[in-house]
Amino acid sequence: MAMTLSLFFAAPVAHAQSSTGRTTLSRAIELIDAHLEKAQRETDADLKRRMQIEAYVALLSLPSTHRQYEAADRLRVIHEPLKPLSGDNHVLETGIDEAIVLAGERGHLQRVYLIDRQYYGSSSGKGVDRQYFWQVMRANDPDAMTWLFQSMQPALGERGSATNRGIVLNWLCQRGYRSLAREVAIRLTEPEVDGVMGLALADLGATAEAEQRADRVMMQTAQHAPAGPEILARLAIVASRRGDGAEVERLVRKFVSVVAPGQILPDRRVSTDYGDCDWTLDRGYWFRWGARSIYWSTAFKVHGESRPYSSPWPSQLVALAESIAGTSTGARSIDLIDQLIVVFDKSARENGIDMINAAILAAAPQTELAMLNGPMISWYVARQSLVLARVMAVGAIDDQAARLLSLDRIMEFLISYPHSGLVPRLADLPEPERKILGQAAPRLPATLRFIALILEGRGADAQALRASDPSAIWLDNWRLTYLIDILENAGLRARAVAALDAYLLVFPEKQFAVVWLLILQGQVDKARTMLRDFAASSVSGGGGFLDVFTSVMLLQEMGDDTDISSFMRLRKSDDVEEASRRLIEIVDAFAWAARADQIEAALRDLPSEVAQLPPRDASCLRDTLEGLLAVALSRRGDLEAGIRLVADRNLEQRKLCWPGEGRSKGYHSEPVFDIRFLVQEWARRGHDGP
């Protein structure tokens, strides 16, 4: 059987080896034209239509004017009758989207306009505007970007226009252009955008400019005035995250002096979450890694970013109190928080709030009376949060505070304020306070101490605590790794390294969140070790999705030169379907690295684990591996050899195929092994020159 299976691969591999090397742009055009001519001779109507879609999309993906109007016009005609969920529609729409991206990256706005006009039938120029925005962003040109922001048309009046500008600033920050976003925000001085720009400037570290916007907004109309205190509160939050206690105190005192007590309301809130412009790490690393897999990128819409935790929006006064606690502790901080409580109580009286009645209503929130008096309950909740802020500033834990404390409240605070002095206190909480807290929530003292020990880098103590009473520690591991992310984002590298070392002492199991942190911290050897554990993972049953692909892909990026057969030998298995799946994921990773020679070598001498596949599954595996080889060749620059490997495939064979029986087995993915995909991968790697 091993010899039979090898024969399945022998001819195509030899065929691929006969290629002459890098394919030129002119030769790529000839290959696409030949594909169109072949489509004209095809008698199967479905296959003919698909081949035409592939070829015309490929033409529009090249930096050439060859048949571009014909391509756009023909694709529009073909698209009109297609069903939205059909394979043809997927190939056409995803292909056009990628063609626009490629044109934008080249600065080829004429191509974007042509697709807008000829294919979409639009003359609005929206596609060109979008690509021009990305072009200006990549040029890092503050003058041009400021002009773009100033020229934005209001979407929903003044307020909508300002909000749009804030969203677009976030786009710049998401893509690593924080300095450009900051420069643009400073230059946008129109009064109607002061509120939005003030908050953005606070996150971007332009504190003086943000405070100026707050002062200006508070002098404007009543409609805009509430944005001023919100900016001051956000500035205090950001200052606390920097560890600047003196600045926090100054902003708190300014807030109290400029905001009338009657205007300090629980529904005047401020975000304590990390926005796009005050988060410096890569939130989307997992999506970015996954998108490199041909399977994942064709089976799913890979997008977005990872935000494992989202903080609530407290009232502005509560946020100020927590900002104080987040950067300093002791009598001075507690006294300042007590002053805020006095201001809050005065505001409650001026607004006719009876806190005793509010407490009674809050005790039974599901009653009809309570539901009718929601605003009053919000006053009570805000008052309790101010009491909690005293505890966060290392105030005493009494019976009232113990009833208010919870794991979620502590986590929210530690996430928002990485410089807090609460961590060392929780690590060694005095016995009387631990007892009071335990009476209110029996497992909470041990869990909070465990978290604090990890963050303090005291791994041996955390390990001993966990061993002494495992049931007392109840929390998901991602909460701990996210807290280490927070330390990294705050620039507290030494603390983050110590915390991660402590975490690994207690939880040595492989996790990609830990791999990312190890790579970020430069602990490459530890990352490699964990990645090799992932590469030996099972891919059947409860095995991690694409763990093998991701680990092999990252190992190669770190310079690992292990070949495919050696990666296969990391895990011995008698399950030929699992072995086939592992082989596909490994080859997928080698295809990302464009290591076509390694894939060809593996195809000539297939791992023994897959030698027992029945003929139908062997053919299925062959189609997938040869398709991945075609992609690798194209990414390496040898588009002609790649096209040769997939030129005669039927519609099913354009998909990935998984050996075995079941709903997710067989030819199971969106179409990918075709001339359109290969041309775009070839172009994306920069091989589309003359």
Image: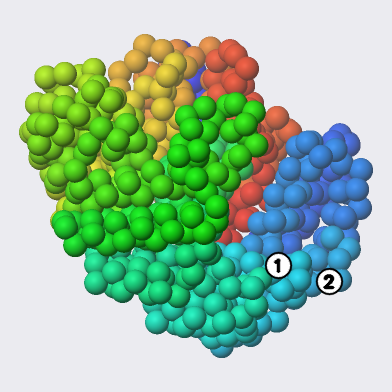
**Residue positioned 29% across, 69% down in the render:** 249
| Residue 355 location (% of width, % of height) | 46, 44
Q: Badge 2: how crowded within 10 Å, few (<14), some, or many (20+)?
A: few
| Residue 130 location (% of width, % of height) | 68, 69
**Residue positioned 32% across, 46% down in the render:** 387
Callout 2 amino acid: Ser
| Residue 615 location (% of width, % of height) | 56, 15
* Above or below, comparing residue 125 to residue 584 in the picture: below
* Above or below, comparing residue 411 to residue 685 in the picture: above
**Residue positioned 23% across, 59% down in the render:** 335
Q: Which residue is mark 2?
A: 124
Callout 1 amino acid: Gly
| Residue 318 location (% of width, % of height) | 40, 54
- Viewed as shown, does residue 598 lie left or right of 198? left
Of 361 and 322, the residue lying toward us: 361
For the C terminus, the image quarter is bottom right
Report, in whole angstroms, how far the alpha carbon at label 2 lies from the one at label 1: 20 Å
- Viewed as shown, does residue 151 lie left or right of 198? right
Q: Badge 1: how crowded within 10 Å, few (<14), some, or many (20+)?
A: some
**Residue positioned 36% across, 55% down in the render:** 341
Of 369 and 500, the residue lying toward us: 369
The image's mark for residue 160 is 1
Which picture quadrant has residue 117? bottom right
User: Is disc 2 placed on a helix, strand or loop?
Assistant: loop
Looking at the image, the residue that sits furthest to the bottom is 143
**Is residue 487 visible in the rendered structure shown here?**
no
- Viewed as shown, does residue 411 lie left or right of 40? left
